[in-house]
Amino acid sequence: MILLFIAVAMFTAVHLVPALPSIKSRLKERFGAAYGPGFGLVATITLIGIVVAWSFTSFEPVYEPVKFFRYINMAFSLLAFMFLGIFFFRGKLRQFFRFPFAIAVVFWSTGHLIANGDQASIILFGGLLIFAIVFIILSLINKVFPTLVVRDGHDVLSLVIGVSVYIAMVQLHEIIIGVPVIRIDQIFGG
C-alpha cells in the first residue's frame, strides 16, 4: 500500500505543475524545448508507476459497495474518457470546460470510489480525486487557461477518440489492471 501511496503522490506532484505557472515557467526556462517532451515522459512514468504499484497491492475490504454502483462507474468512466479526449484535442470544448483533464479524473475517481470498497481503491481513487480538486482550485487561483488555439473538427474528433478509447479500455481492463470491468455472473446477479 505504501508503494501505491508514493506512486499517487508522485503523479500528483508532476501533474500539478501546469496549475502552478511560476514553477512551470522556471522549468520551461531551465529545460527549453525539452520541457514538453520531458514533462510528457515523466507524467507517463508516474502513470506507469501507479499501474505497477496497483499490481502489488492486496485486496483489503473496507466497505461493501452497492452492486448497482458498478453501472454508475461505467457511465462515469465513459464521461471521463470523453473529457480526456477533449483534453488531448484543441476544440472549442476544451476552451469551454477549461480543465478537461481534471474533470476526467473527477469522474473516473468518483465512479471507481463508489464501485470499489477496498483500501487500495481508496488510496488510488481518493488520492486522484483530491489531486483533481486541488488542480482545479489552483488553476482558478492562478488564472490558468488552455491554449487559445482552436482547431476546426477537433470537438467531434475528441469525443470520437474518447469513446473509442473507453471501449478499448473496457475490453483491455482485465489484461492491463487485472480486474474485469464486468463479469457474466455480475450481469445475472451472481
Image (spheres, rainbow, N blue to C red):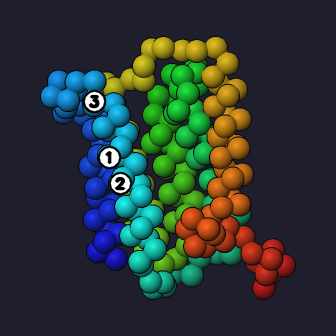
Q: Badge 2 local density, few (<14 within 10 Å), some, or many (20+)? A: many
The three-letter code of the residue at mark 3 reads Ala
Whether residues under marks 2 and 1 lie with C-beta atoms below 8 angstroms apart, the answer is yes
Which residue is denoted by mark 2 in the rendering? 46
Which residue is denoted by mark 1 in the rendering? 42
In-front residue for pair 84/39: 39
Q: Is residue 152 above or below residue 39?
A: above
Q: Residue at x 48, y 78 (%)?
A: 118
Q: Is residue 164 above or below residue 9?
A: above
Is 80 left, or right, of 131 in this rendering?
A: right
In-front residue for pair 175/151: 175
Percent coordinates x, y for residue 126 in the rendering:
41, 63
Q: Secondary structure at mark 2?
A: helix
For marks 2 and 3, give the CA distance.
18 Å
Numbered badge on residue 75: none
Q: Badge 3 local density, few (<14 within 10 Å), some, or many (20+)? A: few
Which residue is denoted by mark 3 in the rendering? 34
